[in-house]
Amino acid sequence: MSKTAKKIAVVVGLLIAGFLIWYLFLKPYDYLVTFKANTTAGTINQSLKQWSLGLEGSNTVQQENLNSLNQKININDTVYLYNWKISSVNDSVSKVKVYVSTKENRFQNKMSIPFSNTNFEKVILKTITNFRDKLNAHLKEIKVSVIGESTTPSTYCAYVSIKDLQRNKAKGMMRNYSFLSSILANEGIKMNGTPFIEVTNWNIQNDSIAYNFCFPIIKSDSLPEHKDLKYKQYNGVKAIKAIYNGNYITSDRAWYALLEEAKRQDIEIHKTPVEFFYNNPNYGGDALSWKAEIFMPVK
């Protein structure tokens, strides 16, 4: 063998040895799954958390940021670690990379994966396929259309202030809808538009919000008094707007679409969305026909 051939063999051997050392001992994950979804990172984020609540057995989700979440799932006494990384491909498509590992049998898993279809792989693929199917089913139930720059309507309103988790927003509205409508109707106060919410604080890290649930009314010198009822003039603001169709429980999907639109257009915004609702969920019907106008105020 010539000296050149020996050098090439040594280099190749070192590369193979280096790869094996990295793959078996240094690689931080055991398995990678990648897929795309026709939605925003925020919608995937929220759908993942909602899906996690319905899983059997113990599991936890911790959010590093909107695009990165760590999940632990206990399946048959084995703890699976899922690191979900979400990135935007374009204005309508996101890519999801799921880095999976376990605390047990890591060396064995890495040795087996290239040569056989292991139970480890089957469990991972079943779990992620389940989430992807639930996500795609959810996307068929909603529609978000970004319109562009607009202005929110101005109105005088009666309102109640609420603090809760983001996913409980619609429950808070339903809980107070009858209260607001009955107390105003009993005093003959006339409505002057469609109900809306004004978010005053949105903690994206822990999915909590504070908001005012508002009924537009015609201002009067004689307004009913109640310890939980307040009144104010809501002044319209410049904003970017989206139309949301679907169950109002998940109207926050439009918030994330507006966040991404603002980022693409380099628009500075206040992360305090305003939502105007044009249907009463108590009447039922096809939720996809329900309409809400969603605004994200511009700085």
Image (spheres, rainbow, N blue to C red):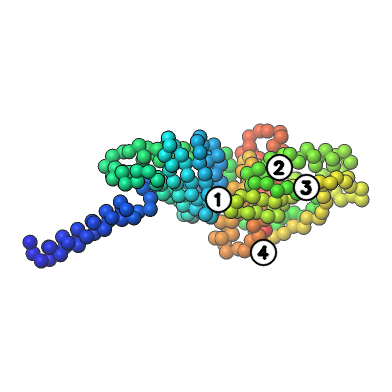
Q: Residue furthest bottom?
A: 3
Classify 69 as above or below 142: below
Label 3 element class: strand
Classify 4 as above or below 201: below
Residue contact between numbered discs 3 and 4, judged by CB atoms under 8 Å = no
Closest to the camera, between mark 1 and mark 4, is 1
Classify 238 as above or below 250: below
Residue contact between numbered discs 2 and 1, judged by CB atoms under 8 Å = no
On the image, the x and y values in percent for residue 151 come to 70, 57
Q: CA distance from mark 1 to mark 3?
A: 27 Å
Q: List the residue tagged with mark 3.
A: 160
Q: Earlier in the sequence, mark 1 or mark 4?
A: 1
Which residue type does callout 1 highlight? Gly
Question: Which quarter of the figure has residue 239?
Answer: bottom right
Q: CA distance from mark 3 to mark 4?
A: 25 Å
Q: List the residue tagged with mark 2.
A: 172
Closest to the camera, between mark 2 and mark 4, is 2
Q: On the picture, is 125 further left or further right than 50?
A: left
Q: Earlier in the sequence, mark 1 or mark 3?
A: 1
On the image, the x and y values in percent for residue 137 come to 52, 38
Q: Earlier in the sequence, mark 2 or mark 1?
A: 1
Closest to the observer: 170 or 112? 112
Q: List the residue tagged with mark 1.
A: 42
Label 2 element class: helix
